[in-house]
Amino acid sequence: MASEKEGGTTTVPARPGDEAQDRSFHSVGKPIRRVDARGKVTGETRFADDLSLPGMLHMKLKRSTVPHARILAVDATRALALPGVRAVLTGKEFPVPYGILPVSQDENALCTDKVRFVGDPVAAVVAVDELTAEEGARLVEVKYEPLTTIGSPEEALRNPEPQIHAYGKGNIHRSVAFDFGDVPGAIAGAAHVFEDSFFYQGNTHLPLEQHATLAYLDQNGLLTISSSTQVPHYLHRAASKVLGLPPARVRIIAPPQGGGFGGKTDPFNHEIVAGKAALLTGRPVKIALTREEVFFCHRGRHPVQMRMKTGVDAEGRILGHSVETLLDGGAYGSYGMASMHYTGALETVTYRMDRYRFRGCRTFTNKPPCGPKRGHGTPQPRFGLEVQIDKICEKLGIDPAEWRIRNAVPPDSVTANWMKVGTIGLVACLEAVVKASGWKERRGKLGRGRGLGIAASSYMCGAGHPIYFNDMPHSGVQLLLDRGGGVTAYCGSTEVGQGSDNVLALLIAEVLGVEPADVKLVTGDTSLTPIDLGSYSSRVTLMMGNAAIDAAERARDRLAIAAAQKLGIPPERVGFGGGRVFDVSDPGTGMTFAEAVVRAESAGGTVGVVGSYRPPPPPARYKGGGVGPSPAYSYSAAVVEVEADETTGIVRPVKIWVAHDIGRSLNPVAVRGQVVGSVYMGLGEALMEEQAFKRLPPKLSSALVHVGPSMLDYKSPLTLDMPEVECFLVEDPEPSGPFGAKEVGQGPLLPIPPALANAVHDALGVRVDEVPVTPEKVMAALRSPSRRCGPEGFPVVPWPEALDVPPPWEGGDGNARNEPPRPPKKKEGVRP
Amino acid sequence: MQDFSFHKPQNLAAAVDTLKKRPEAKALGGGQSLIPVMKLGLAAPSDLVSVAGLAELRGIKVDGKELVVGAGMTHAEVADSAEVKKAIPALAALAGHIGDAQVRNRGTLGGSLAHDDPAADYPAAVLALGATVVTDRRKIAADDFFRGLYQTALGADEIVTSVRFPIPEKAAYAKFAHPASKFALVGVMVAKGPAGVRVAVTGAGPGVFRQADMERALGGRWAADALAGVAVKAEGLNADPYGSAEYRAHLIGVMARRAVAAAG
């Protein structure tokens, strides 16, 4: 039965000059109820699918039934004849391509000449109600000329033709190669060399809220699109571009969402088509996707094949580490270029390695496109690395927890691939889970069928660069203080359930000495709020948080000057707290917060301020080094205890101890919630979830289809499958974080799959070098003479010439030695 | 889901009458099989005739050497029934592990049998115990009732009213549940009783089936290790992303041994 146990909080002693550590707080660090909690638990929160307008029309998409084909004709005659149908849209309406990354503008809102996977939208039918729209979509007739289906990365490599997209090399979307020092040389001189192949299956986000969009023209003719999107800013760009409207004539609103996990981080075809339909009909147009369609939107975890080769000295210290990854990208670019870089970029930030070599290749296939899911591109190589370390320790007779503690990257390092890390709570995380789980006494001693496994990990607190390179802030917060003492905060940040609204209100309240509930929020609206780039890459707490503090401090300064004048003291002596503004050396003397606002407004006009945040420039300067840098990195460690049945192969997690380096918890209850949620999602990936495909029999078109695009067929753990989770928070305030806070939304997922696989080895002595660890694979490993189940090798990939980037300790400066001269920096350049 | 008319007849005769008059009508038990199928667009009956609450389909009693369970009894009612626990504890245990609590509170014995999902639990019990399915018009032996994937001997307007289970000397059910749906990836019911030794397998093939080799082995000696030499062929078994045919064949052996051991 699922339960959550509150482990301790470890506070790392302050370093000299660490002021944030000494500060006392009103709201930060307290288990206060979330500002959005009431609406969520009473059902009053209005999600996108709750929105409705008078005269609203409904839209359904006609989706491709074949995986790869040219569109010969789309006949809407019968659909248009159906009573109640108001419009049918096709690809002709959408000649302008779009995509989340500037380098992958490869989607059309409706397919123009080709379909690329079963589920690709070909036409949209707008009707007076949803059932009529659905029937209309059924009546749209599409003639296809089938093309060869590319079903896997191997098929993509073997068949450059037919090309799924007109860019890339054959069906290779992009491949990259980096040498951070001479890894073959390091391996040649190593005492022990380990080579392993791993596979991490694709899986999907499965947010409980399915995507929904309502598009309408407001009374001034402004096209407004309310949509379940994690990225209103990027949807704004894409919709304006495709619809041919100046951005100022398009407004995107992101209502609160029932989960995103990266699945709502692309601009989506249905959002843009709904906008077009509203423009064409002059009526509000709504589309609510079915669960099946959410599986087609996908953008989930890439299936990744990996080869890892590591050379260590006699003590197990890593001299050289090589990672090769092959990604099954699906039918479109999406974030795929970034995903591919992420399968290598964070390999270096946990354990010391002298030299590092990375090769990555992403292929197009005729499946729903893969993209970013919680952990974006890093859980796959993290699985490989953490399992390989377990094997290294087994061979060398080293305790794998001890190895990790001994080899942890020290704080304030620059790694072999030029990632600059600040605070590192990795050792404290490891020590917490080792102690609580009884690791030293219990590992290897639980008897056959029961075992413990350990793994650790790291994740970014926001990307160091925006998707479109520019010099502007990544997040902006505007504050308006009213004469009644109210504070209204405006920010483009998007509440997807992760708690961003709460962080925003909390930080402003903390600085101004008011209660979080007194801060009114306007978020996720491109017409009303300053830009926040979106809820992705665990960037919101750090970036929005710093912008919020910046804005609140500016407001505080204005109030302090006005209050100081009245109190006859210098502004530095003015304090804020409990809804009052007072003399810190005589706290009884002061005024209400509202009076301070009135004084400031009388003295200097309306009290409206802005704050913003832009991360510092990272040291990585080589091409491709734009993916991976972050102002800060969180760390996690987990011990998983399993029962594994050698007669059926089923693995049941019994208990999980997880520790997360949060820097500082702004709200410990919310932080623990994210940690446990990450553990849950990690367990689903580790044990059962698969975005898998099959070919239909020839009599049914041989199409490559999803095996089960429904919650009945897609396996995900239920509450009864959740073991007890004991959660520890490690607090070591990060100077670049708001009051020292780091991310928690993604990092704690990462150690779960490898810790589980390592636990299976402790229980049964077999290795499953694949995710998910299914009962059938455990049985296969038990039967295999090698006591292993996993890929038998790695495909031959035509790697490009490697960029030669010396690590910092080999005389590098962050540039590649052999890089061709880079074009001068454009105002909005192209990355990576 | 397509629109449909909903009927709630007062008695069994009226229900049968409605089904006879409307050829596209379907009888509805607890709605745990038919409603999901309708939501997926795989069935679109013109009418639904609710039968679960009919008095003729209610009740559990022991009648001589048989346990009689009304077709309208929910899985939860069967699982909790003192009569069932006493007469055939294996049947109560099976019912108590169908789906989840919500499914068990709605789903009915008759609905499960009429739907005949290849991974449903009840068909294994009916077949292994050599039960008799009683309808509004006749009695059908278990061996004649199940006809493969979603197919039964029932006529389109025929309603299951009860099932008569001969009380066995020994019986037990062991299943390996699908992690999401809790349907049986493989479920094996073993029984030794008036109908002899019977082994029924669900989840593994296109429909529930008896395992003759295992029945012979257990007929010779009722012990888990008597099954050691019985090879289960993968041929004809289901293969899907949740398990290959070979893995299901392996599980049939494991589950059968566990069931025999549990039956004692």
Image (cartoon, rainbow, N blue to C red):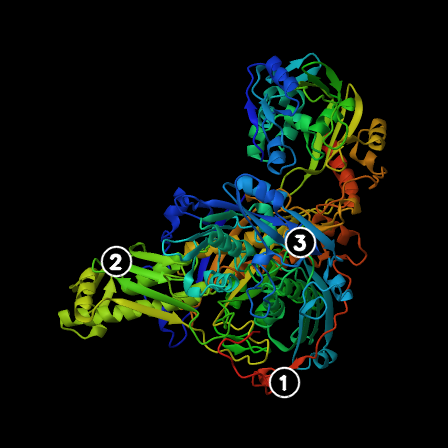
Q: What amino acid does circle 2 point to?
A: Gly
Q: Residue at left 75%, top 31%?
A: B208
Closer to the camera, B171 or A673?
A673
Question: CA–CA distance between discs 2 and 1?
Answer: 56 Å
Closer to the camera, B261 or B139?
B139
- Crowding at mark 3 (Cα within 10 Å: few <14, some 14-19, many 20+): many
Question: CA–CA distance between discs 3 and 1?
Answer: 41 Å
Tag 1 residue: A820
Q: Quadrant of residue A388?
A: bottom right
Left/right of residue A477 with respect to residue A103 in the rendered view: left
Q: Are marks 2 and 3 in contact (CB under 8 Å)?
A: no
Task: Tell me, yes or no, if residue A586 can be seen here.
Answer: no
Closer to the camera, A534 or A722?
A534
- Crowding at mark 2 (Cα within 10 Å: few <14, some 14-19, many 20+): some
Among numbered discs 2 and 1, the one appearing first in the sequence: 2
**Does residue B151 lie above or below A532 as drawn?**
above
Among numbered discs 2 and 3, the one appearing first in the sequence: 2
Q: Disc 2 on helix, strand or loop?
A: loop
Which numbered disc, 2 or 3, marks the residue closer to the eye?
A: 2
Chain letter for mark 1: A
Q: Disc 1 on helix, strand or loop?
A: loop
Chain letter for mark 2: A
Residue A622: % across, % down: 58, 80
Q: Residue at left 50%, top 73%?
A: A465
Left/right of residue A740 with respect to residue B118 in the rendered view: left
Tag 2 residue: A486
Chain letter for mark 3: A
Q: What amino acid does circle 3 point to?
A: Pro
Left/right of residue A608 with respect to residue A212 in the rendered view: left
Task: Tell me, yes or no, if residue A824 can be seen here.
Answer: yes
Image disc number at residue A772? 3
